[in-house]
Image: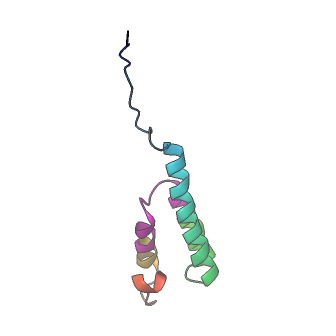
């Protein structure tokens, strides 16, 4: 008659974890390129943040923006709204 099938549920059943990782990384890299092109960060800070984002330091885009705000020199006034 009818056979009962067991269905295994995997962690990345809905969306592959590699796809999720690449989407997140591309968002962070796109933001870094935008900041470097507009002059909000210099090439040295860009290089450092590029490697940090590749190493999964930033969980999301907002975390990267906050890190940029905190890593700027103290004499340089920079707010969260001016970066967005």
Q: Nearer the viewer, residue 81 or 64?
A: 81
> Is residue 58 inside the magenta stretch?
yes
> Is residue 63 inside the magenta stretch?
yes
Q: Nearer the viewer, residue 8 or 49?
A: 8
Q: Which residue is the extreme one toward the front? A: 1
Quadrant location of residue 3? top left
Q: Residue 75's x, y, as percent?
A: 44, 90
Determine the residue positioned at 53% across, 64% down.
Answer: 28
Q: Nearer the viewer, residue 1 or 71?
A: 1
Q: Nearer the viewer, residue 52 or 14?
A: 14
Is the stretch drawn in magenta largely helix, strand or loop?
helix
Q: Residue 82's x, y, as percent?
A: 46, 86
Instruction: Specify start and end residues of the magenta stretch as a single range.
Output: 51-66
- Going by the image, does 33 lie left or right of 9? right
Q: Is residue 79 visible?
A: no
Quadrant location of residue 43? bottom right
| Quadrant location, the N terminus | top left
Determine the residue positioned at 48% across, 44% down.
Answer: 15
Q: Give the total of numbered labels.
A: 0
Give the color scheme: rainbow, by chain, secondary structure or one colour. Answer: rainbow
Q: Residue 34's x, y, as percent?
A: 59, 76
Q: Is residue 6 visible?
A: yes
Quadrant location of residue 8? top left
Q: Residue 5's x, y, as percent?
A: 38, 18
Determine the residue positioned at 55% across, 71% down.
Answer: 31
23 vs 49: above or below: above
Determine the residue positioned at 57% across, 71% down.
Answer: 32
């Amino acid at each position: 008659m009818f056979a009962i099938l067991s269905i295994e549920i995997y962690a990345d059943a809905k969306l592959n974890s590699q796809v999720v990782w690449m989407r997140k990384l591309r968002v962070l890299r796109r933001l870094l390129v935008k900041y470097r092109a507009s002059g909000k960060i210099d090439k040295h800070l860009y290089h450092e943040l590029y490697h940090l984002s590749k190493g999964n330091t930033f969980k999301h885009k907002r975390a990267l923006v906050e890190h940029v705000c905190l890593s700027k020199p103290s004499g340089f006034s920079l707010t969260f709204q001016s970066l967005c």
